[in-house]
Amino acid sequence: MLLAIDMGNTNIEVGVIDKDILFTERISTDIEKTELEYAVILKTVMEIHGVEASQISGSIISSVVPPLTHIMKQAVRKLVKDSDPMVVGAGLETGIKLLIDDPKTLGADLVVDSVAALDEYGAPAIVVDMGTATTITVIDKDRNYVGGVIIPGVRSSLEALVSNTSQLPRVSLSSPDKYICTNTVDCMKSGIINGQAAMVDGMIERFEDELGYKTTVVATGGLSKVIIPKCRHDIILDNALMMKGLKVLYDKNK
């Protein structure tokens, strides 16, 4: 069994994969936690799902939180004896050519998403990942990673709006029935949800215009299930994309 860990700025997704994904869980990202604390958390998560550390034969980590990467590696080593976790980064075989200014600066999450999208859906592809930031990346018809955009995420945008205004309240991320709303709370909800959906639609159109052809569009990330149903493009919602990509990368490089 493969222990797969995706470390994001807000949450860490933990999964165990055999032939299929057995389970995934999310825990909070906390740079104050020690390797022992993370080892205990990982052990607890696996035991809840009936998986023993002795059943883990390999592990892979994707991280956009550099201060925690080594800590998580040590946590996995404590939990899985004789394990040396694979870390997504320079030197791994991905099967994708990176046509960007400095490939070393590309986030591990974007690499994993792209690998999974190519393996699962083929090229050309656009991948929308809605987490702390919303990223939209493009793989062309020749399987080249050609770039994309980084946008403030849904919750980040909402938090900035509430924190910098005196009268706007905190609201839940549920969609109102109408686009044109008549009270403050629904106006905020429509703006943040429908506005983000319109942005995704608009960026897809501009990317495809620049490429000169249509693409398969895939969306993932914690808030994609709220935003993507409001989009007007045909978008595949796949919240297992990161785990699938980690499995593909592990198999390519083990």
Image (cartoon, grey):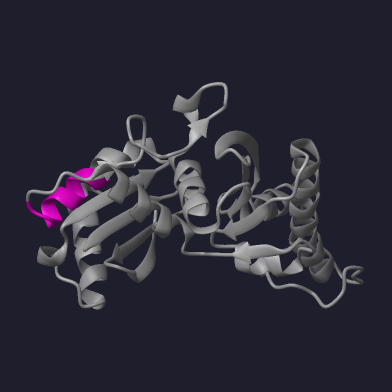
Q: Residue at x 81, y 60 (%)?
A: 191
Q: Tell me the magenta residue range.
A: 72-81
Which residue occupies 56% across, 27% down? Answer: 99
Q: Is residue 102 above or below residue 153?
A: above
Relative placement, left or right, of 233 versus 131 is right
Out of 185 and 58, give the one closest to the viewer.
58
Q: Where is the C terminus found, in terms of image quarters?
A: top left
Is residue 238 found left or right of 208 in the rendered image?
A: left
- The tally of labels here is 0
Q: Residue at x 51, y 22 (%)?
A: 102
Q: Is residue 20 above or below residue 62?
A: below
> How far across and how far down the image is residue 42, in percent?
24, 62
Q: Position of residue 82 (x, y in %)?
A: 7, 49
Residue lying furthest top: 101
**Which residue is nearer to you in this view: 59 or 10?**
59
Quarter assignment of residue 144: top right
Q: Residue at x 47, y 41 (%)?
A: 111
Q: From the viewer's perspective, is 147 left or right of 22?
A: right
Picture quadrant of residue 209: top right
Residue 232 visible in the snapshot: yes
